[in-house]
Amino acid sequence: MAEKVLTIADSITVGELAETLNLSVTTLVGELFKNGIAATINQRIDFETATIIVDELGLDVELEKKSTEGAGPERKTHELSDKAVDRSPIVAVMGHVDHGKTSLLDAILGQKVVEGEAGGITQHISAYQTIRKGRSLTLLDTPGHEAFAALRQHGAALTDVVVIVVAADDGVKPQTVEAIRFARSANAKIVVAINKVDKETANVQLVKTQLATEHNLNPEEWGGDTVMVEVSAKTGQGIDKLLDLVLLVADLEELKADIEVPAEGLVIEAHMEVGRGAVVGLLVEQGILKPGSFLVAGTAYGKVRTLLDFNGKPLKEAGPSTPATITGFKEIPQFGDSFEVYKTEKEARARIATAKIENERNAASTNVTGADMLKLMTQKSETPDFNVIVKADVQGSLTSVMDSLRLIETGGQVNLHVVSSGVGNITENDIRLAADDKTVIYGFNVELPPAVKRLATRERAEVRLYRVIYELLDNAKDAMEALLAPEAVETVSGTLTVKGVFRTLKDQVIAGGEVTSGKVTSGLLVRATRGDELLAEAEITSLQREKVEAREAFEGDLCGFNLKTQRKLSLEIGDKLEFFTRELVARTLK
Ligand code: GDP
């Protein structure tokens, strides 16, 4: 049993973790580095990584994840007070293209849903409301499923129920599968709407069989627990039943929200309009948004000038689960940002100042996950592969592109791996090949047809088109360099011989000695050795010369110092200390 149990969040910065563990940041960074992770103080690592590191350090500490009650791992939940009230369910309508998602929304709302009304905004979610038997439902629609995926990355608890639309004459298709996956990962309930049942070619049984055998969604009449409704967006058949069942499924969850708290929610759409300024679509999660409220979303500030419902009609207030469109933001917030309401403009502005600092810090860092780390640990010594697919207009140019790529001098640091190559435009097949892993598709003097481009965007495949071979090669070289793990470069600043040890604590040593070469400054890393034995790595936290605090000490100086250690370090007279810096330097292809 570990001595201490420490509770940390799902992800934590290196600095915060060091503080929690009572370790020096350099110790932690060093340990991460040993495990193949080049991290800086503000970098976030996830819980799994933190656990692995704690294990590796042999600390007598057990980490426990701060609980996120009653929800899936990626849901951000608001703690509910006992004053929480019922809220309407939030229902996402998803499905394969042309399976009738838009028609179904039209039929539900009794009006034409104008796709992409926000004009050219790639990432947005349209939100609507409808009333069924006196109860309100919030419906979400998005042009592509990526928008939902993006929101999920923001940790948004957005959807309670996902209605998966499957055309009865077409069956389960790739985006149907994507929708199922989304619903499951978002911990949302699934209701299947089997659409187009008015068609002669409709085969409801086949759809049910596909869902049951291939996707483990078993209809209730077969003894399963997935609600499936036959509908026709064209004739209106089954639409009321669908809504009733969605409400029923939603009732299985306790959907509540607090209203006596400052309003909070998500930005689901944002664009500029002449004469109106920033027009921002919000979905309120808790609290009540009102005209005049002071808002912050990311680093954007606003004061609600107009508050409109999804139809553009003025609202007095917008409570939980309500979609609203507002004006009054000074700049456009980002899709997926959370917004929060503050009591005063001053508080809101203060929040923005902090958010800006956080952003700057985060800009320098990227997230390192446990999975990344395990991958790095197992692949540490392996040479990375640079996977490419090459397409060119004619055989001659294909040959020269391929030859030149192979001639890029990597010094054995990166392997070029040609997944496939050929003559002709980029095809859907190329995208599928590339989508599986990190593969770059290079096109030389060829086109990327629009349909293929859409697939590429959806699959997040990287396609790069060139007409000049050197530009293609430069890009490939940069991409290969990016695959190289950074190198730790140590620079020794000075050395010292221990002449006296004054105090040894669990994580600290106070000692004195003579600088035998170079220079010693506070903040440097320290390697302590006794003969050939490496004792420990520590950090010098303060330095005194002639009993006064000093910035530095030089060869020949006698000085006292404090070392912050990871474990108890028993220094002895005669031990040697080496002071150094360790920087992570991006490697380049020699
Ligand atoms: P989306 O891409 O999923 O939004 O699909 P749409 O709503 O645009 O529908 C694609 C096509 O299927 C359109 O031509 C619709 O008129 C047609 N459609 C949608 N629902 C039905 C239905 O229930 N029955 C029939 N016969 N056609 C439908």
Image (tube, rainbow, N blue to C red):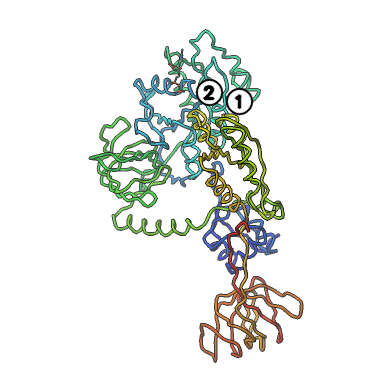
- Characterize the local packing of mark 2: few (<14), some (14-19) or many (20 or more) Cα atoms within 10 angstroms: many
Q: Which amino acid is tagged 2?
A: Val
User: On the image, which quarter does residue 501 sit in?
Assistant: bottom right
- Viewer-side residue, 556 vs 178: 556
| Count of number-bearing discs | 2
Task: Kindly identify which residue carries mark 1.
Answer: 217
**Residue 403 image offset from top left, x and y in percent:** 65, 43
Residue at 65 percent of width and 60 percent of height:
54
Task: Kindly identify which residue carries mark 2.
Answer: 192
- Viewer-side residue, 7 vs 432: 432
**Residue 418 image offset from top left, x and y in percent:** 66, 40
**Residue 457 image offset from top left, x and y in percent:** 50, 35
Residue positioned most to the top: 200
Residue at 26 percent of width and 46 percent of height:
292
- Characterize the local packing of mark 1: few (<14), some (14-19) or many (20 or more) Cα atoms within 10 angstroms: many
Q: Is residue 329 left or right of residue 541?
A: left
Compared to 177, does 222 lie above or below?
Answer: above
- Viewer-side residue, 439 vs 122: 439
Residue positioned most to the front: 396
Circle 2: element type: strand
Q: Is residue 444 left or right of residue 414?
A: left
Image quarter (top left, top right, bottom left or bottom right) of the N terminus: bottom right
Residue positioned most to the left: 275
User: On the image, which quarter does residue 185 sit in?
Assistant: top right
Cα–Cα gap, marks 2 and 1: 9 Å
- Viewer-side residue, 373 vs 193: 373
* Earlier sequence position, callout 2 versus callout 1: 2
